Amino acid sequence: MKQIHAVEIIQNTSNANNGTRRNISILIAAVLSMLATESKAVRPFVTDDARIVDEGQVEAETWLEAGHVGGDWSPFPAYNVMIGTSVNQWLELIAGVGVGRDSNDELTYSNPAFQTKILFNKAEIDSIMPGFAFGAGATFDTGRGDMHDVGSNYYIIGMSTWRFNDDKLMLHTNYGARMDRERGGPQRITPYWGIGFDLEAFHPEARLIGEVFAGDPLVLNEPKYASQFGIRWLPSDYLNLDVTFGLQPELDEGRNETGRLEFTGQIGIRMLFDVFTPGGKPGRAEGADGLFSNPSY
C-alpha cells in the first residue's frame, strides 16, 4: 500500500506522553464516526517507498476524501483502513478495506485489498545506492453497494528510495505492471509507474509531499496518470498526518476520458504501534534492515 512513513526521518520517541496518547485516541474516534455514502478514493500517498516497519511493529493508516468534478465539491466521508505488520526483517503483510453508508443509507464496503512487500536493502542516508523493495498486491471481487468495484485487480511493483541531505529530501520511484479484470470480462495488463518526493519545509516536523503515478494500483480501471500534492505533519515517530490534493482525468464507463478533470482532497492519518517487537523493545525509527542488509537491532 501507500505507506506513510513518519518514522524514517525522526529519532525514536517511543515513550509518547499521555497527552499524545489522548490526542491519538481522539483522532481515532473522529475518524470512526465518519462513515461514507460513496468512495472511489485513492490513498493519501500512493507511490510506495522501499521501506517496511521494524519487525513486530503494527501500522494503521486511515483516510477520508472529498471530490469535485465539473460542479460543486461533493463530500464522500468514508472510513478506510489499512493495517500491516512486518513478520521479520524483510517481509511486511498489509490488508485493508473501506466501509460506510451508501445512497440508500445501507451498509457499503469496498473490495478488500491485500499486499505483501519484501525489502531487499534499506535506504541509507546520503548513499548513492537506493533502498530497494518488491511488492505485490490484489483487490478481490467481493463487496457491497457504492464502494464495490465489480471486478478485481493485481499488481507487481519494484520500489526504490533515496535519502538526501540528512533526510531533508527523499525520492521514491515505482515501476511494474498491473492487471485489471472486470467480472465476466477480459483481463487488461498495463505498465505501472510512480515518482514521489518528501521535502522538509520550514520545520523538521513539516514536509511537502508530491507524486505523479499511473493511477492507484488498488482501484479498478484507473486513468493512465494522476497526481497528488500536499503537506505532512510528523509530531512523533508514532503518528503522522497528511493533507493532500489530487488531480486526474475523469473516465466514463468505457474508460474514455471525458475531457473533465477530477479533483480530490484527502486527510490521512498513520499510526504505529510496538505490538510484537522482539524482546518487547521499541521499534526503530528507520524501520527493518532488509534481506541483504547488515542487522543493526
Image: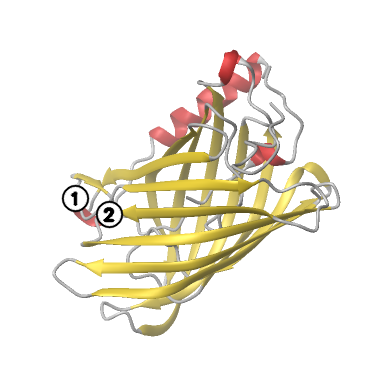
- Color scheme of the displayed model: secondary structure
Identify the amino acid type marked 1: Arg
Quarter location, residue 153? bottom left
Give coordinates of residue 162: x percent, y percent: 73, 56
Q: Nearer the viewer, residue 210 or 160?
A: 160
- Relative to residue 217, is residue 266 drawn left or right? right
Q: Which residue is mark 1?
A: 144
To which residue does mark 2 refer? 147
Residue at the (33%, 45%) spot, across then down: 98
What residue is drawn where x is 34% and y is 60%?
Answer: 154
The extreme left residue here reads 184
Which residue shows up at 41% across the image and 48% down it? 115
Say what secondary structure mark 1 lies in: loop
Q: Horizontal and vertical percent for residue 101?
A: 25, 45
Residue at 67% in and 19% down: 16
Dot 2 crowding, Cα within 10 Å, few <14, some 14–19, many 20+: many
Three-letter code, disc 2: Met
Give the position of the C terminus as an image quadrant.
Answer: top right
**Residue 235, image x, y percentages:** 70, 33
